[in-house]
Amino acid sequence: MKAYQDGTSKLVESDTQAFGISIDSATRNRNFAKSLGLTYPLLSDLDLKVSEAYGVLNKQTQFANRTTFVVDKKGVIQYIEEGNSAVDPTGAITLCTSLHKKSDAAK
């Protein structure tokens, strides 16, 4: 989460909105975000519906697997990074920058 915060300016430059989703409560997410100085929203998936819909819910442990998704403005998933490497925003930032450049070129 902190690495994404550090990359926020690059995401803003590429017309990208970052947010996190956690199975923790909104209160825990708010406290966690404050402790890390996050400026992007953390959403609560307390009922696990989003985690299940995106296929990242580990049903045995009832935890969501760490995953990064880049969803374009049409709602199409363009990129998925799973596991421990999902905390590194490099791939997501690269793709968002590329999508933004394509969008600008199409105008």
Image (spheres, helix red, strand yellow):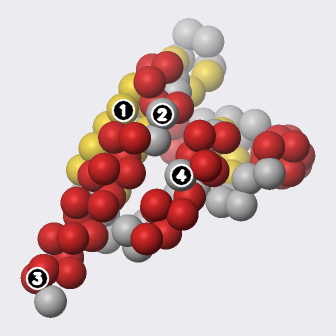
Q: Amino acid at mark 4?
A: Gly
The residue that appears at 57% across and 46% down in the rendered structure is: 4
| Contact between labelled residues 1 and 4, with CB atoms less than 8 Å apart | no
Residues packed near mark 3 inside 10 Å, few (<14), some (14 to 19) or many (20 plus): few
Q: Position of residue 72 (x, y in %)?
A: 30, 63
Give the labeled residue for mark 1.
81
Q: Are marks 2 and 1 in contact (CB under 8 Å)?
A: yes
Q: CA distance from mark 3 to mark 2?
A: 29 Å
Label 1 secondary element: strand
**Left or right side of 98 for 58:** right
Compared across the picture, whether 29 is left or right of 106 comes to: right
Q: Earlier in the sequence, mark 4 or mark 1?
A: 4
> Residue 88's mark?
2
Q: Residue at x 32, y 58 (%)?
A: 96
Return the x and y of residue 86 as percentages of the image width and height.
Answer: 46, 30
- Above or below, comparing residue 68 to residue 43 in the picture: above
Image location of residue 35, percent across then percent down: 87, 43
Residue closest to the eye, 27 or 41: 41
* Residue 52 shows up from this direction: no
Query: Amino acid under label 1?
Result: Glu
Of callouts 2 and 1, the N-terminal one:
1
Q: Which residue is mark 4?
A: 7
CA–CA distance in space, label 3 to label 1? 27 Å
User: Marks 2 and 1, Cα distance to the nearest angstrom?
Assistant: 9 Å
- Disc 2, SS: loop
